[in-house]
Amino acid sequence: MQKHPVTGMVMATLMEAKPFVTDIPLEKTEEYPFPVFSNEKIILIISGIGKANAAMATFFLCQAYSPKIILNMGAAGAAKDGFSPGDIFHIKHIVEYDRPDFKTGHPHRYKPFVLDGFRLADIATQDKPVIHPEHRKNVSELAGLVDMEAASVAHACGKFDIPSTFFKYVTDTPDHHEEENIIKYIKMFRKPFSRFVITSVLPKLFNM
């Protein structure tokens, strides 16, 4: 498949994506089957929350636009201590915590494309939010961060031989996990996160 000189972006919610739409800026160009915002260099798709939504949106993005790379961004939880709300990480390893391999019984794993110069972390993806302390403890044995989309984005990109790269910002921790706090931190840190990606990440991707 011939790749186009555009960068694809997958985000779960418009709440997280709003600063990217306004600050890059991007115009809404599609509504169905997924909302799409774009300019001459970027195609941003809003997938919806969860693995199935992320997989379908990424598949659509790959098939319809054939981007040179796909960047998945957004909120993530911390599975262990040592993380603070607002911390930004570049993902170096993805574990699909709730999809074991039929032969080995081990979770599927993905190695995304990693850029130099950023703080790194591993992430575990599953469809169920990791809220309960015992659940966090189990997941923390495999990864420091948790989300509900990254593994599906990586999996779908692999089907098209399109590289994927991931940046996440922390919105809940073992000490900050109430739902109202998660929403508060998404809104509080989405602007600094978008500024970081726009100024520090996108220039590197554009120059690839």
Image: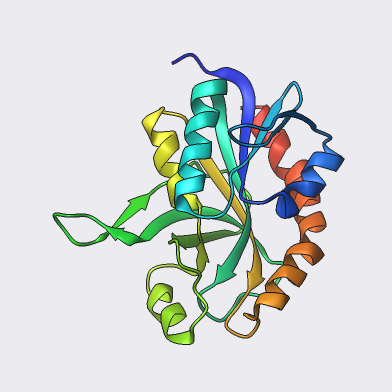
Q: Nearer the viewer, residue 117 or 37?
A: 37
Q: Is residue 186 above or below residue 135?
A: above
Q: Residue at x 39, y 42 (%)?
A: 155
Compared with 132, 155 (above or below) is above
Q: Looking at this rendering, what residue extends furthest in the top direction? A: 2
Picture coordinates of residue 106 (x, y %)? 24, 61
Q: Quadrant of residue 47?
A: top right
User: Where's the N terminus, which quadrant?
Assistant: top left
Quadrant for the C terminus in the image: top right
Report if residue 91 is visible in the image: yes
Note whether 184 is above or below 14 in the view shown.
below
Q: Residue 20: percent from the left, percent from the top?
A: 78, 43
Q: Residue at x 51, y 37 (%)?
A: 58
Position of 208 with respect to 187 (left or right) is: left
Q: Residue at x 58, y 69 (%)?
A: 77
Where does the image place residue 83, in percent across and percent down from the top left? Answer: 61, 75
**Quarter of the image where one finds residue 33:** top right
